[in-house]
Image (tube, rainbow, N blue to C red):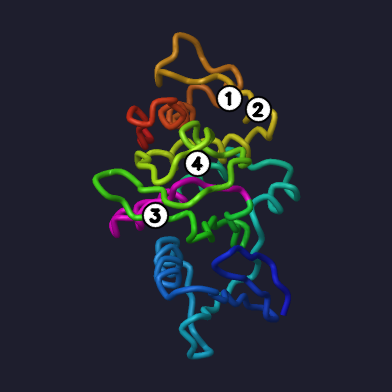
């Protein structure tokens, strides 16, 4: 078997024409990931009768950064599918009073070239009164962190449950336009969802619904962000 993805919680190994997800920690991670798989209608099974291994009968599985390297960038339609897939997983977690804190490119896997699954349960936290309690350090070097997580943090810390919105918006911009444009958008320090002028780095998709969705997610003030696609 060949390892194709790994984090602190699980490993994905290719086993002939199938992929085994091997969990390294508690059963709660298994429950979380099977819920995310179900939200995307990805079938899985346990042929080994072991609670710490589930099997995916899919044709291909690769990380999003690997996928982008092969395709150069995502098309507009592919970016919408990415948004739709991650949104389905966000709503699945919210029904369980859980949420993503942030996203990273290498933790999204692309299944059969058209389904995008977030594979790192370590980035999922309980929601308490619309906040997330942060009790452990996070990597501060990720390009996709919201501004409230980039500064030096004093733990424990309450973070408003909109940090994932900013992070997802950066992921989508990166997939559409690349790293340089993403860094330019971060420097804009967007303070209003209805700017007096268009946001130049995103002009190629102005005035689509996606453009305004991204602006709502990229607001500097976490309390003002909205996860609305209209």
- State the residue at coordinates (48%, 20%): 190
Q: Earlier in the sequence, mark 3 or mark 2?
A: 3
Q: In front: mark 1 or mark 3? A: 3
Q: Which residue is mark 4?
A: 168
Please check the rendered image and state whether residue 92 is part of the magenta-colored stretch, yes or no: yes
The span from disc 4 to disc 2 (Cα, nearest Å) is 15 Å
Q: In front: mark 3 or mark 4? A: 3
- State the residue at coordinates (68%, 41%): 73
Q: Nearer the viewer, residue 136 or 114?
A: 136
Q: Are marks 1 and 2 in contact (CB under 8 Å)?
A: yes
Q: Is residue 33 above or below residue 125?
A: below
Q: Secondary structure at mark 1?
A: helix
The span from disc 1 to disc 2 (Cα, nearest Å) is 6 Å
Q: Which residue is mark 2?
A: 181
Q: Is residue 124 above or below residue 131?
A: below
Magenta residue span: 85-105
Q: Secondary structure at mark 3?
A: strand
Q: Earlier in the sequence, mark 1 or mark 4?
A: 4
Q: Which residue is mark 1?
A: 185
> With 151 as the anchor, is 180 left or right in this view?
right
Q: Earlier in the sequence, mark 1 or mark 3?
A: 3
The span from disc 3 to disc 4 (Cα, nearest Å) is 16 Å
Q: Which residue is mark 3?
A: 125
Residue 199 image point, x, y percent: 54, 18
Q: Earlier in the sequence, mark 4 or mark 2?
A: 4
């Amino acid at each position: 078997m060949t390892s194709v993805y790994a984090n602190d919680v699980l490993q994905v190994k290719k086993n002939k024409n199938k992929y085994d997800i091997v969990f390294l920690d508690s059963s709660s991670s298994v429950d979380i990931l099977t819920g995310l798989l179900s939200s995307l209608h990805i079938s899985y099974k346990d042929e080994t009768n072991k609670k710490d291994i589930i099997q995916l009968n899919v044709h291909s599985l690769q990380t999003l950064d690997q996928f982008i390297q092969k395709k150069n960038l995502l098309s507009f339609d592919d970016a919408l599918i990415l948004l739709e897939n991650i949104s389905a997983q966000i709503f699945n977690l919210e029904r369980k009073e859980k949420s993503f804190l942030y996203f990273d490119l290498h933790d999204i896997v692309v299944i059969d070239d058209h389904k995008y699954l977030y594979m790192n349960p370590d980035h999922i936290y309980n929601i308490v009164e619309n906040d997330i309690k942060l009790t452990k350090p996070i990597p501060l070097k990720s390009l996709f962190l919201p501004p409230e997580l980039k500064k030096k943090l004093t733990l424990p810390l309450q973070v408003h449950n909109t940090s994932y919105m900013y992070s997802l918006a950066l992921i989508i911009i990166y997939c559409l336009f690349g790293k340089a444009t993403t860094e330019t958008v971060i420097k804009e320090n967007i303070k209003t969802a209805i700017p007096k002028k268009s946001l130049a780095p995103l002009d190629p998709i102005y005035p689509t619904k996606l453009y305004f969705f991204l602006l709502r997610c990229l607001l500097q003030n976490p309390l003002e962000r909205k996860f609305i696609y209209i």
